[in-house]
Amino acid sequence: MAKATDGNGTPVPQRLLAAATRLFAERGYDRTSVQEIVEAAGVTKGALYHYFGSKEDLLQEVYARVLRLQQERLDAYANAEAPIEQRLRDAAADVVVTTIDNLDDASIFFRSMHHLSPEKNKQVRLERRRYHERFRALIEEGQKAGVFSTATPADLVVDYHFGSVHHLSTWYSPEGPLSRQEVADHLADLLLRALRP
Amino acid sequence: MAKATDGNGTPVPQRLLAAATRLFAERGYDRTSVQEIVEAAGVTKGALYHYFGSKEDLLQEVYARVLRLQQERLDAYANAEAPIEQRLRDAAADVVVTTIDNLDDASIFFRSMHHLSPEKNKQVRLERRRYHERFRALIEEGQKAGVFSTATPADLVVDYHFGSVHHLSTWYSPEGPLSRQEVADHLADLLLRALRP
DNA sequence: GATCACATACCGACTGGTTAGTCTGCCGTG
DNA sequence: CACGGCAGACTAACCAGTCGGTATGTGATC
């Protein structure tokens, strides 16, 4: 039998991360005890502290994963070969879809970031800033090309859009009338419509 | 000397509420101990539990206050005598300004709502829903009148706008380049531009 | 191929510290 | 003197992280 898998098949560190993600999203970081996490993952504290330095490390790992994923996808869409309008629309819609696919991570991200220690918080903010900048560059590119209105500073437009993405975890439900793709198309459309010259 | 004012002048319950608001926003609900709140307010636990039933009651009171305030203002703008475009623009900009004026309350609201017990949470959601409905009605009115595009369901448009309002507490700073009124005007403008037919 | 040395993976009782809420009682005012 | 308004010590519960211990595997040596 391979190591660190128990009777399950999934390695223990991943099981811990998955359990923590679900519990953090469900009842918040502070309300989730380490004991609950290890029970949900079917191990004990010894295992958790064998793989992770602290409870906070677990939280940071959740962030790191979602940030990596979204940055990769944004870069792919932003650097594609297509007119700027198309690239922005695709990127804007994609972030909605992937956020809906990872609603747990999203709600943890926006609700529990301030639970990280100052240094870790700084690092997360830095990565988040990189993402923001890339997105802003797309909008500015379109503004310079004259296809987007310059009435609003690009920075603000980015925050406008990401506000709505951020907000998804508080209202979107898979059981609702709209599929994730429909929501994504609508939100991207609102962005592009707001940017019409 | 009047009762419940200490050497200060402000009544104790209000001092407690103000201290709690600041601390909840600063370090989060769970990370703020009752002891810290009473110290910041210059009283002791006895005083707090004399006026409030629990720590959670304090949090709920913060919500109730900000909800009352915003509902009142929305109603005033929504029921004014003006073309629908103007009324929506005013209401959309006003919620931005008052949110910036109460950034502490806003960040508490969006980060700590899930800390409320199910019943209290339900009540807050209900009031919030009323607010949402009133705003949506404005958009639908404009859509029926033909001055707003019907490309996007009104519900989604509301969530789009409130996402950005919600998001303000994570990026807006009074020291930044934009005044609250400028931000409000820009955000309202983005909304109206997205709604152009 | 048997034995020893060492490492990895994990267990679970325990510790030191913190916290929300309680309770008894004091104190000034009407 | 009665009572609202408050003080502050106390309690019962909880929790992150530690630590000594066990089990299994792996590689070197004879």
Image (spheres, coloured by chain):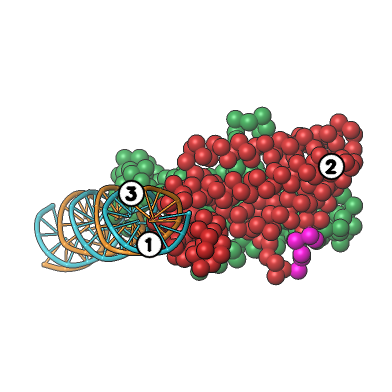
Chain colours: A green, B red, C cyan, D orange
Where is residue B44, by image quadrant? bottom left
- Marks 2 & 3, CB-CB < 8 Å contact: no
Q: Residue at x 73, y 53 (%)?
A: B96
What residue appears at the point 35 percent right and 40 percent down from the top-left corner?
A: A8
Q: Which residue is mark 3?
A: A35
Q: Position of residue A186 (x, y in %)?
A: 75, 39
The chain containing the residue under callout 1 comes to A
Q: Looking at the figure, which quarter contains the N terminus of chain A? A: top left
**Quick check: is B100 in the magenta stretch?**
no
Both marks 2 and 3 on one chain:
no
**Separation of disc 1 and disc 2 at Cα?**
58 Å
Q: Nearer the viewer, mark 2 or mark 3?
A: 2
Q: Residue C27, located in which quarter of the rendered image? A: bottom left
**Image mark 2: chain:** B
User: The residue marked by circle 3 belongs to what chain?
Assistant: A
Q: Residue B67 placed where, x, y %? A: 64, 45
Residue B195 placement (x, y as % from top left): 84, 42
Extent of the magenta region: B177-182
Q: Nearer the viewer, mark 1 or mark 3?
A: 3
Q: Which residue is mark 1?
A: A53
A130 over B96 or under it: above or below: below
